Image (tube, rainbow, N blue to C red):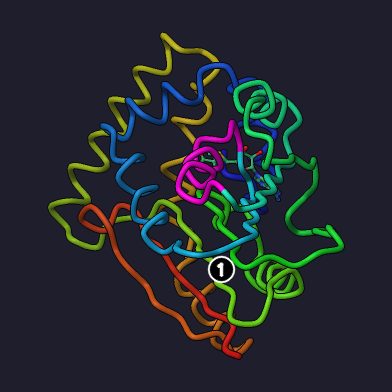
C-alpha cells in the first residue's frame, strides 16, 4: 500500500536492500542507471566541492570523485546500512566524507559548488529540500536532481506497466525487493516531483533546465543559483 507520505516508504525500501542494490539497479534499469548518471556528470566541470544527497551505496559519489579528482565530496544519506556500504566501497577515496543525515533536516555548516541527488526527489517535499539545498549552495552553484518519471506516451506507459508486472513476479524470488517492486511503480505513477521542484526552484529564483531521458522514464532538473 502507498502510504500518504512517500517518506514512509524509505525504511521499507532501503533498510534491507543495501547488499544487492548496485546489482539490482543496474539489471532492473537495463544499465540505463549508468546512462542517467552519465547525464548528471555531464553537468559537472570545475566544481571544487560537491554534496551528493541520498548517496546510497555511493555509485554516483564515486563517479563524481573520478570525474573531479581534486574536489571535496560529501555523501549524505538517511539510511545507515546504505551509508556503511558506501564507506566500505569508497574507503580508498580520501576526498570523500560521509554523513548520516536527513536531507529534509540538512545541517552541514558549509556550502558547496554543486549538490546532486539521484532518486531522492520523489521521497521529499520540494519546498523543504530546495530551501535546504539553497542554504548549502555557493553563489553560481547548481542543484542537479534526478529521479524516475512515469512516461507520458501511452504506448511506452503500456510497456512500462508490463515491465513492472514482470518485476513484481521477480520479487517472489528476491524477497528483500518484493515490496519495492509493489510500491515503487505506484509512487512513480502518482508523484508530481518534476512540476513541484521546477515550480519551487523558479519561486526561489533559480534558473532551471529540465531534461527528459529514455522515453520519459527518468528526468533531470538542473537549478542554478544566479550570482
Ligand atoms: C535508490 S537509493 C539511490 C542511491 C544513489 N543516489 C544512487 O543513485 O545510486 C535512494 C537513497 O535515498 C536515501 N534517502 C531517501 N530519503 C532520504 C532523505 N530524506 N535524506 C537522505 N537520504 C534519503 C535512501 O536511504 C537511499 O539510500
Q: Residue at x 54, y 72 (%)?
A: 197
Q: Of 28 and 221, which appears nearest the observer?
A: 221
Neighbor class of circle 1 (other Cα within 10 Å; few <14, some 14-19, many 20+) is: many
Residue name at image x 49 percent, y 21 percent? 178
Query: As displayed, is residue 95 above or below residue 137?
Result: above
Q: Quadrant of the C terminus?
A: bottom right
Image quadrant in which you'd find residue 92? top right
Determine the residue positioned at 60% across, 23% down. Answer: 89
Distance from mark 1 CB to nearest ligand 1 atom below 8 Å: no
Q: Quadrant of ligand 1?
A: top right
Residue 67 among magenta residues: yes
Judge by depth and name the residue closer to the eye, 120 or 180: 120
Q: Is residue 117 left or right of residue 5?
A: left
Relative side of 194 to 116, left or right:
left
Q: Position of residue 143 (x, y in %)?
A: 56, 68
Q: Which residues are magenta?
A: 56-69
Where does residue 68 sit, x and y in percent of width and height? 51, 51
Count the numbered circles shown: 1
Please identify the quadrant where the N terminus is shown: top right
Counting from the top left corner in percent of width and height, residue 77 is at: 70, 42
Residue 23: % across, % down: 42, 21
Farthest-out residue, front: 70
SS assignment for the magenta stretch, majority: helix
Label 1 residue SS: strand
Q: Is residue 193 left or right of residue 48?
A: left
Queried whether the magenta region covers residue 80, the answer comes back as: no
Q: Label 1: which residue?
A: 143
Amino acid at each position: 500500500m502507498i502510504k500518504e507520505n512517500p517518506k514512509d516508504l524509505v525504511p521499507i525500501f532501503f533498510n534491507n536492500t543495501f547488499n544487492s542494490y548496485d546489482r539490482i539497479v543496474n539489471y532492473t534499469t537495463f544499465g540505463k542507471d549508468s546512462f542517467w548518471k552519465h547525464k548528471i556528470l555531464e553537468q559537472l566541470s570545475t566544481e571544487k566541492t560537491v554534496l551528493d544527497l541520498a548517496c546510497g551505496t555511493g555509485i554516483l559519489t564515486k563517479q563524481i570523485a573520478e570525474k573531479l579528482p581534486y574536489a571535496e565530496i560529501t555523501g549524505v544519506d538517511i539510511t545507515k546500512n546504505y551509508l556503511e556500504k558506501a564507506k566500505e566501497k569508497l574507503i580508498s577515496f580520501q576526498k570523500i566524507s560521509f554523513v548520516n543525515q536527513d536531507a529534509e533536516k540538512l545541517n552541514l555548516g558549509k556550502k558547496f559548488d554543486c549538490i546532486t541527488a539521484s532518486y531522492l526527489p520523489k521521497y521529499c517535499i520540494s519546498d523543504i529540500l530546495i530551501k535546504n539545498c539553497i542554504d548549502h549552495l555557493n553563489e553560481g552553484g547548481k542543484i542537479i536532481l534526478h529521479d524516475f518519471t512515469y512516461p507520458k506516451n501511452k504506448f511506452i506507459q503500456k510497456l512500462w506497466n508490463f515491465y513492472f508486472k514482470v518485476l513484481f513476479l521477480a520479487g517472489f524470488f528476491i524477497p528483500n525487493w518484493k515490496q519495492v517492486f509493489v510500491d515503487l511503480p505506484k509512487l512513480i505513477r502518482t508523484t508530481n516531483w518534476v512540476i513541484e521542484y521546477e515550480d519551487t526552484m523558479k519561486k526561489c529564483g533559480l534558473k532551471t533546465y529540465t531534461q527528459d531521458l529514455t522515453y520519459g522514464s527518468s528526468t533531470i532538473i538542473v537549478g542554478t543559483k544566479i550570482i
